[in-house]
Amino acid sequence: MPPRRKLNEFERGRAVAWFQDGVPKREVARRLHVSISVIVRLIQRFTATGRVQERRRPGRPKKTTSREDRLIERLALQTRTASSSIIRRQLRVATNTNISQQTIRNRLHGFNLRSRRPAVRPRLTPAHRAACRAFCRRHVRWMSQRCE
């Protein structure tokens, strides 16, 4: 059985229309790739209220708007190594919104963005590069000699 997923408003309207046209609930569920219980609850809600919209759920309202969320995502993608405190400062300057670093991390996690640190590697001096090029020139036929 497919995992439970939410139907968007268009899919909910489509499911109700199919059901009213006489399509069985099981077939509606198969067409929308959801379990039959999702369709049963949708039809029950539609017959009780006459609407396909979901009820408002309790819970704390979000501190950021969808526009601020998009800005957080864009700031994180522009500078991949920026910390949540840096993004928080940039957001405060841009929108005058004061939110915690944890909220920034939660939003980035929601966008499937993970923190990254640049790889720490030793610096190559011009002498190192010259030695590397000389090695490559000396051993350019290394593999072809081995295969003969």
Image (spheres, grey):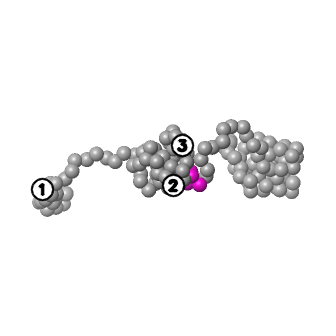
Q: Is residue 54 visible?
A: yes
Task: Please identify, in this view, whether the residue under mark 3 or under mark 1 is nearer the observer.
Answer: 3
C-alpha distance separating marks 2 and 1: 45 Å
Kind of residue sitting beneath label 3: Ile
Q: Mark 2 — residue?
A: 94
Whether pointer 3 and pointer 2 mark residues with C-beta atoms closer than 8 Å, the reply is: no
On screen, residue 119 versus residue 123, left or right, reads right
C-alpha distance separating marks 3 and 2: 13 Å
Q: Mark 1 — residue?
A: 127
Q: Position of residue 48 (x, y in %)?
A: 88, 44
Magenta span of residues: 67-73
Q: How many marks?
A: 3
- Nearer to us in this view, 127 or 141: 127
> If the image is split into quadrants, where does the N terminus sit?
top right
Task: Please identify, in this view, whether the residue under mark 2 or under mark 1 is nearer the observer.
Answer: 2
Crowding at mark 2 (Cα within 10 Å: few <14, some 14-19, many 20+): few
First-in-chain label (3 vs 2): 2
Q: Mark 3 — residue?
A: 99
